[in-house]
């Protein structure tokens, strides 16, 4: 019996450590972001994630600010819904709609039984082979809640915006602290490490708040840069 005690103690310590670090994904998240360029606010994004009985829904509404509200007043509505599995979010449908720009509207249907992705934009429909790690542009930001990134050095997944399917690669490292009206957060830093001529995406995830993105910077090949920063965050267990 005495030989079993060390192994039993180690197992209990391991289980205790796991219980202390594992935090279930929340049932509801309400996040508000501001998008800016060159320090000028362009839009406010209001997002709500809800989870219930193995399903999730995501709604994002972008409202233009300042001069953009004068010249391009239309809101942008993005929706995603699907299942919650042991691997996280499994989208079933995604839609993008911009007021006054019907030509930019898009819809994606995830046909998991067929491993196919059905896309529709401006009346043009296509069907693509769909890898198992596919997310949409909205669910991808909340899939981080379900990933164990503590020891990860990189992350790869496929993502659709409703009109195409791309593969994304991120290098992962410790990020600098983030401060805003939403609070102060230690972060993980994701960098797409874009090559010349490619768009670079940088994401900072709030380590203590379920890896919810608190800052996103998108840099275009010609140098233009959009910054999305968290301004308000409400999380329900």
Image: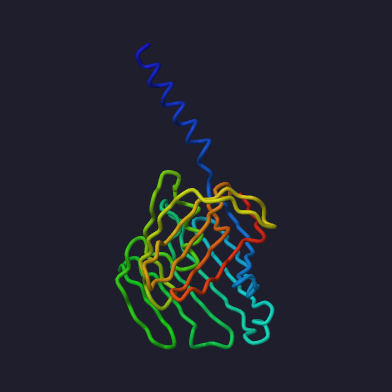
* Residue drawn 41% across the image and 44% down it: 151
Residue 129 at x, y = what percent?
29, 71
Please say which color scheme the image uses: rainbow
Tell which of 118 and 177 is nearer to you. Answer: 177
Please identify the quarter of the rendering in which residue 230 is found: bottom right
* Residue drawn 60% across the image and 66% down it: 47
Residue 170 at x, y = what percent?
40, 58
Tell which of 115 and 104 is nearer to you. Answer: 104
Residue 171 at x, y = what percent?
40, 55
Please identify the quarter of the rendering in which residue 69 is found: bottom right
Looking at the image, residue 182 sits to the left or right of residue 208; the answer is: right
* Residue drawn 49% across the image and 54% down it: 189
Q: In the rendered view, tell whether residue 67 sits above or below residue 1.
A: below
* Residue placed furthest toward the top: 2
* Residue drawn 41% across the image and 62% down it: 192
Please identify the quarter of the rendering in which residue 9 is found: top left
Q: How many marks?
A: 0
Residue 102 at x, y = what percent?
52, 87
Q: In the rendered view, tell whether residue 206 sits above or below residue 124.
A: above
Q: In the rendered view, tell whether residue 190 sits above or below residue 109.
A: above
The quadrant of the picture occupied by the N terminus is top left
Looking at the image, residue 115 sits to the left or right of residue 54; the answer is: left
Tell which of 134 and 28 is nearer to you. Answer: 134
Looking at the image, residue 99 sits to the left or right of residue 193; the answer is: right
């Amino acid at each position: 019996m005495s030989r079993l005690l060390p192994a039993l103690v180690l197992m209990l310590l391991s289980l205790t450590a796991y219980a202390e670090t594992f935090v279930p994904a929340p049932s509801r998240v309400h996040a508000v972001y501001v998008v800016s360029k060159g320090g000028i606010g362009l839009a406010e994004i209001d997002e709500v994630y809800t989870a219930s009985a193995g399903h999730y829904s995501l709604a994002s509404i972008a409202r233009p600010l300042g001069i953009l509200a004068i010249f391009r007043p239309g809101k942008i509505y993005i929706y995603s819904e699907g299942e919650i599995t042991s691997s996280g979010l499994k989208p079933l449908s995604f839609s993008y709609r911009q007021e006054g720009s019907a030509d930019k509207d898009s819809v994606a249907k995830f046909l998991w039984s067929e491993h196919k992705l059905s896309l529709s934009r401006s009346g043009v429909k296509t069907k693509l082979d769909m890898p198992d790690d596919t997310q949409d542009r909205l669910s991808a930001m909340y899939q981080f809640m379900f990933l164990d990134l503590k020891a990860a050095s990189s992350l790869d997944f496929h993502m659709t915006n409703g009109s195409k399917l791309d593969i994304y690669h991120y290098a992962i490292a410790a990020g600098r602290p983030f401060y805003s009206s939403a609070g102060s957060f230690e972060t993980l830093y994701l960098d797409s490490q874009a090559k010349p001529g490619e768009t670079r995406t940088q994401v900072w995830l709030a380590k203590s708040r379920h890896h919810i993105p608190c800052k996103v910077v998108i840099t275009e090949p010609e140098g233009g840069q959009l910054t999305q920063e968290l301004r308000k965050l409400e999380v329900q267990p």
